[in-house]
Amino acid sequence: MANDDGGPAGAPSRPPWVAVLVAACVVVGVGVVVAIAALFMGPSPQPPAPAPTPGASGEAAPSAAPGQGYSLSDPLPLAARPVWHAAPSAEYRLTAAPDELRYVSDAGCRLSFRAGPLQAGASPSNAAPRTTPAPSSASASPSPDPETAATRGALADAIEAERKASSSVGVTEQGLVVVTTLGSQGGPLVDMAGAALTVGHTDGTATYVRLAVRAVPAAHAAVAIEAECPQPEQAATAMNHASVHAYLADH
């Protein structure tokens, strides 16, 4: 016997809300599955980009901390004339002088470390080699700061003293920078203005000289290192050796 709704005989009838409930559960279940799949299959979060390194992409690196070194324009913290302390290697023998350390080597090189008064004539106008014409007013570069100007003038005075003591002196290179230290060999670096000279003698021979000079206007002083050798390469090496094994200090 069949039911009135056309279903098989004996089968219980279902209310309409049951079908609605089943459909809703299916929709919710599908949504949960889709959400979980999107969570695991989506792109993983990227870590934040690191901060740019100083100097990268044209950014200037921070300058050295104050006190690590003194350029030609930085005043030295000396109120009185400084003194040299030097101890070159065993190949140099000391031939002492009260205000000037002098060393000689078996290879014929001589090293001198001097400290004296700053000459009144030390000025920017004396700093250029005599073989270099003065620039015109239209193309003249800005005047150097007082500290640099004093050092250039003191270097020019040292070159002039070499000219007066020798038959001929040629300045083969100027504008060199020699580095020594202050207070100890491991102290702050101190830039000195340098020059290379060829000194002629009356017998036709030549000696090669390296000069390094630094003015200390606050102490009304100038300090110098001089390396003199038979060959130019020896003079360059001797100057490097001298500056590494010497330092300036207060009295």
Image (cartoon, rainbow, N blue to C red):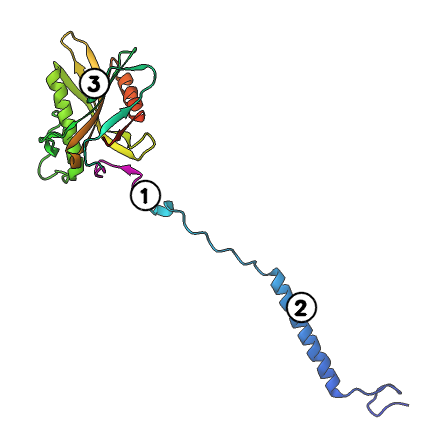
Q: Earlier in the sequence, mark 1 or mark 2?
A: 2
Give the Cα separation between the discs numbered 3 and 1. 38 Å
| Residue 129 visible (yes or no) | no
Asked if 39 appears above or below 63 in the picture, the reply is below
Please give the residue where the numbered disc 2 appears in the rendered image: 33
Which kind of residue does numbered mark 3 sit on? Ala
Q: Looking at the magenta stretch, what is its main secondary structure?
A: loop
Q: Point out which mark residue 65 bears.
A: 1
Residue that protrudes farthest toward the top in the picture: 203
Q: Taking 40 as reference, is 72 left or right?
A: left
Q: Earlier in the sequence, mark 2 or mark 3?
A: 2
Q: Which residues are drawn in magenta?
A: 63-77
Task: Assess disc 2: are there few (<14), some (14-19) or many (≥20) residues with their C-alpha within 10 Å of its C-alpha.
Answer: few
Q: Pointer 2 and pointer 3: residues touching (CB < 8 Å)?
A: no
Which kind of residue does numbered mark 2 sit on? Val
Asked if 47 appears above or below 37 in the picture, the reply is above
Measured as percent of width and height from the top left, residue 152 is found at: 16, 31
**Quadrant of residue 194 within the rendered picture:** top left
Please give the residue where the numbered disc 3 appears in the rendered image: 97
Task: Assess disc 3: are there few (<14), some (14-19) or many (≥20) residues with their C-alpha within 10 Å of its C-alpha.
Answer: few
Which corner quadrant holds the N terminus? bottom right
| The one of 166 and 20 positioned closer to us in this rendering | 166
| SS under mark 3 | loop
Find out whether residue 101 is within the magenta segment. no
Find out whether residue 74 is within the magenta segment. yes
Give the Cα separation between the discs numbered 1 and 2. 61 Å
Which kind of residue does numbered mark 1 sit on? Ala
* Residue lying at 25% horizontally and 32% vertically, measured from the top left: 191
* Residue lying at 15% horizontally and 18% vertically, measured from the top left: 169
